[in-house]
Amino acid sequence: MLIFMVLIFFAIGFATGALSSYGAYLAIVKSSPLITLLFVYIYLFIGMAIVFVAASYREGFGYTYFIVFAIWGLFAFKVGLRGEVMFPTAVIAAILGRRRIPLKTHKLFIVVSLMLFATIIVKNARISGDYSSVDNINPLNAIAEMGSSLRAIQEVIKWRKSGFELLNGESYWAPIERQLALFLPIERLPSLQDKRLLNVVVMEKAGPIGFSPVAEAYANFGEKGIILISIILGSLFAKLDRIPSTIRSDILIGVAIIPLFVMIRNSFAFIPVQIFIGVVLAFIILQLAKVKVDT
């Protein structure tokens, strides 16, 4: 699945010209909702596939799939797709951490430092369009740039001062309702007209700045919503982390937290369906693996 999705990524990317630069990528996904959706699920399945690899890895298995992921990640990162690479990488680290596979301090320092340098270099290229005039490689600027996720909460505070009504949980319910509407007699507006979807609203009001769980909590319930959602997410991750590490539990946890990690810089809109797809896919693969072992 990992190799297949990587090949599909390159096929679509080169065929559409989306991989020529970050500006070209944005132009393509902005002009074609279908291409956007394809890329969203390519990234999802790449992330899920590498979760299967990390959770089931044992000494002697080799590094083939990690190398495939790294090659894809280097290319995608160079184009400017930082979150698409960094979020599944963080999930891999979480899964390996659950399995008590240690990473020595000096190696961790090297990895983090390289990631910060790469982040700021790619930021320059995302702005200028190429790597011909990269003149700022201060890693501290990468840390500051990560703080730009505060832009989302700044935006929703500004909306509220301008008369934006709190959604009172509607942005969390809307994605679920829209899926139910595929099977039940419930009105289902076109996604671009459904103002409960905050990815749609933020695109209209501020452009492609991403989003965040803090901003979404504020847009729904105001200041108290930030505390409430933080407690819920913290309790959820603490509960998951207390589950004993097995191949089965690590795979199921991994496919569930891939979308949750992506939500760090995005809205809740895609989360329910992606978690559902991931869990169903994981159960299917686990069952096929069990049947193969039994036979």
Image (tube, helix red, strand yellow):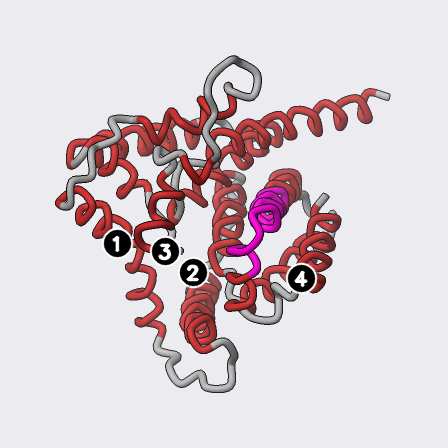
Q: Quadrant of residue 161?
A: top left
> Is residue 232 on the magenta stretch?
no
Q: Is residue 67 left or right of residue 152?
A: right
Q: Position of residue 274 (x, y in %)?
A: 53, 34
User: N-terminal of the two: label 2 or label 3?
Assistant: 2
Q: Is residue 146 above or below residue 43?
A: below
Pointers 1 and 2 in contact (C-beta within 8 Å): no
Q: In the rendered image, which residue does mark 4 sit on?
A: 16
Toward the right, the furthest residue is 295
User: N-terminal of the two: label 3 or label 4?
Assistant: 4
Q: Amino acid at mark 4?
A: Thr
> Is residue 37 on the magenta stretch?
yes
Q: In the rendered image, which residue does mark 2 sit on?
A: 105
- Residue sitting nearer the eye, 104 or 49: 49
User: N-terminal of the two: label 1 or label 2?
Assistant: 2
Pointers 4 and 1 in contact (C-beta within 8 Å): no
The disc label shown at residue 150, or none: 1
Pointers 3 and 4 in contact (C-beta within 8 Å): no
Q: Position of residue 101 (x, y in %)?
A: 54, 47
Q: In the rendered image, which residue does mark 3 sit on?
A: 207
Q: Is residue 105 left or right of residue 161?
A: right
Q: Secondary structure at mark 1?
A: helix
The answer for how far apart the CA atoms under marks 3 and 4 are is 22 Å
Q: Residues within 10 Å of mark 1 (few under 14, many from 20)?
A: some
**Magenta highlight range:** 28-45
Quarter holding the N terminus?
top right
Q: Residues within 10 Å of mark 4 (few under 14, many from 20)?
A: some
Quarter holding the C terminus?
top right
Q: Is residue 146 left or right of residue 47?
A: left
- Badge nearest the viewer, 4 or 2: 4
